[in-house]
Amino acid sequence: MKRIGILTSGGDAPGMNAAVRAVTLKALHEGLEVYGINYGYAGLVAGDIFPLDKDTVLDIIQRGGTFLYSARYPEFAQEEAQLRGIEQLKKFGIDALVVIGGDGSYHGGLRLTEHGYNAVGLPGTIDNDIPYTDFTIGFDTAVNTALDAIDKIRDTAASHERTFIVEVMGRNAGDIALWAGVAGGAEEIIIPEKPFDMAKVAEHINTDRQAGRKHSVVVLAEGVMHAPEFAEELSKFGDFHVRSTVLGHVQRGGAPSARDRVLASKMGAFAVELLMQGKGGLAVGIENNQLTYHPMDDLFESKHKADMSLYDLNGDLSH
Ligand code: F6P
């Protein structure tokens, strides 16, 4: 193996640049060459590929987003697109790849490995919804961004004795809501993993109000429903001065946290080591603070589990 390629695909996540940097620097350190592929699998198929060196990755560890650009490219599920991608790998002399992203990236990586081009996947998504890893690159930053917003919203919630519904991202996973909710002292956390009863939410807010606590923050995962709809439903149970806020894509941006930079750096270097061992079709994770890897196939058959102890903890602390 002489030359590796690297791409980011799916939704961008803070720390992707740090991962690209780590892969590049580790590979160069090991005497390999590195090529960046713009726009994920779309760029691979189009041959949007260029050499990376130390200077290219200088000063990107602190930058949010991905300087390799990202794209969702479902067409890569078709063999025709895969073969066109492989033509480009041949043309640029790339022997193996690191792919950074979520589920879709791993499917592409596995197909390339089956075609003889080893690919190792790094979990890059704010959602934290990838199996076999406790944390994904970008999750910690997104939680801190959501937390910053929740803290600010609490100020106005308290000043006006309002109930705020704060919708956070996460697709079908409640992880951002759980972590930002516990850290922000949420009165309620509503996540897809746990059915909820609107009458009980209203009762809880009422009990708090009778006890003299006249504002509440409900952290709502987007996978449940949207905040305005939740606010409307809740208002049917009483006048709680409800307002809703959808945090949206602000959670995807910004400088990566120290944890995300370190995680990305560790995982990036580890991916290069795995490729050097001739391994492919693997997804890197961090489990109990140890770097691990699992066949990408195993990930497709498993489901990520949110840390439900946080849900129980929040219930104990807020009721
Ligand atoms: O997967 C990351 C994520 O930000 C999800 O939390 C969200 O549901 C989705 O992407 C939004 O996708 P888009 O940026 O395509 O609107």
Image (spheres, rainbow, N blue to C red):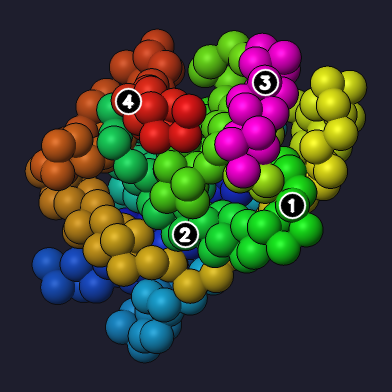
Name the front one of labels 2 and 4.
4
Residue 203 badge: 3
Q: Can residue 229 be seen in this view?
A: no
Closer-to-camera residue (312/56): 312
The image position of residue 276, as x and y in percent, is 14, 50
The image position of residue 268, as x and y in percent, is 27, 57
Q: Give the labeled residue for mark 2.
A: 144
- How far apart are labels 3 and 4 at the CA level? 23 Å
Name the front one of labels 2 and 1.
1
Dot 3 or dot 4: first in sequence order is 3
Q: In which quarter of the image is residue 157?
A: bottom right
Residue type, label 4: Ser
Q: Magenta stretch: residue 300 in it?
A: no
Question: SS of the residue at dot 1?
Answer: loop
Closer-to-camera residue (20/1): 20
Q: Horizontally, is 78 left or right of 131 in the view? A: right
- 52 lies above or below 80: below
Few, some or many residues within 10 Å of mark 2 (<14, 14–19, 20+) = some
Q: Give the labeled residue for mark 4.
A: 309
Dot 2 or dot 3: first in sequence order is 2
Say which residue appears at 62% left-offset and 28% top-offset.
207
